[in-house]
Image (cartoon, grey):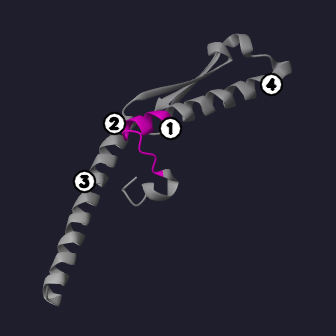
């Protein structure tokens, strides 16, 4: 094989790799869009506090049952809101993993693939 043929083969391999990367980027974007369109809820205190938003991390609302509104125990309410928000974030992460077919890109690779 001549050096020109070797270079042509490497260019073809690089072209195929770039094509595959483009396909992966499209799949990741489609998965992210699918996840972002879903409504997600985090719940704490047996449903006394709820955080609702999208899989795209857009929080739409917080609902607090009046039974937990005790001025003498603000710390408990804060804990419930925090727990509900964490539950919401856990659900968003689960939804995003499902939308990507279980592929966990980690925070470092998402930007490379258009996330």
As measured in the structure, the alpha-carbon distance from the residue carrying label 4 to the one carrying label 1 is 29 Å
Q: Magenta stretch containing residue 10, yes or no?
A: no
Magenta range is: 94-105
Q: Magenta stretch containing residue 95, yes or no?
A: yes
As measured in the structure, the alpha-carbon distance from the residue carrying label 4 to the one carrying label 2 is 37 Å
As measured in the structure, the alpha-carbon distance from the residue carrying label 4 to the one carrying label 3 is 50 Å
Q: Nearer the viewer, residue 51 or 6?
A: 6
Residue 100 lies, with reference to residue 26, above or below; the image says above
Query: For the view shown, which residue lies furthest in the right direction?
Result: 72
Residue 113 lies, with reference to residue 101, above or below; the image says below
Residue 53 lies, with reference to residue 71, above or below; the image says below
Horizontal placement of 49 versus 6: left or right? right
As measured in the structure, the alpha-carbon distance from the residue carrying label 3 to the one carrying label 1 is 22 Å
Tell which tag, 4 or 3, sits nearer the viewer.
Answer: 3
Residue 77 in the image, given as x and y percentages of width and height: 74, 23
Which comes sooner in the sequence, label 2 or label 1? Answer: 2
């Amino acid at each position: 094989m001549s050096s020109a043929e070797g270079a042509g083969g490497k260019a073809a391999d690089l072209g195929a790799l770039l094509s595959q990367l483009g396909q992966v980027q499209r799949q990741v974007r489609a998965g992210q869009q699918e996840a972002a369109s879903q409504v997600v809820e985090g719940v704490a205190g047996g449903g006394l506090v709820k955080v609702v938003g999208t899989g795209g991390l857009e929080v739409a609302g917080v609902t607090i049952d009046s039974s937990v509104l005790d001025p003498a125990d603000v710390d408990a309410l804060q804990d419930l809101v925090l727990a509900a928000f964490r539950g919401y974030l856990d659900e968003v992460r689960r939804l995003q993993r499902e939308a990507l077919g279980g592929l966990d890109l980690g925070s470092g690779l998402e930007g490379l693939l258009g996330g």
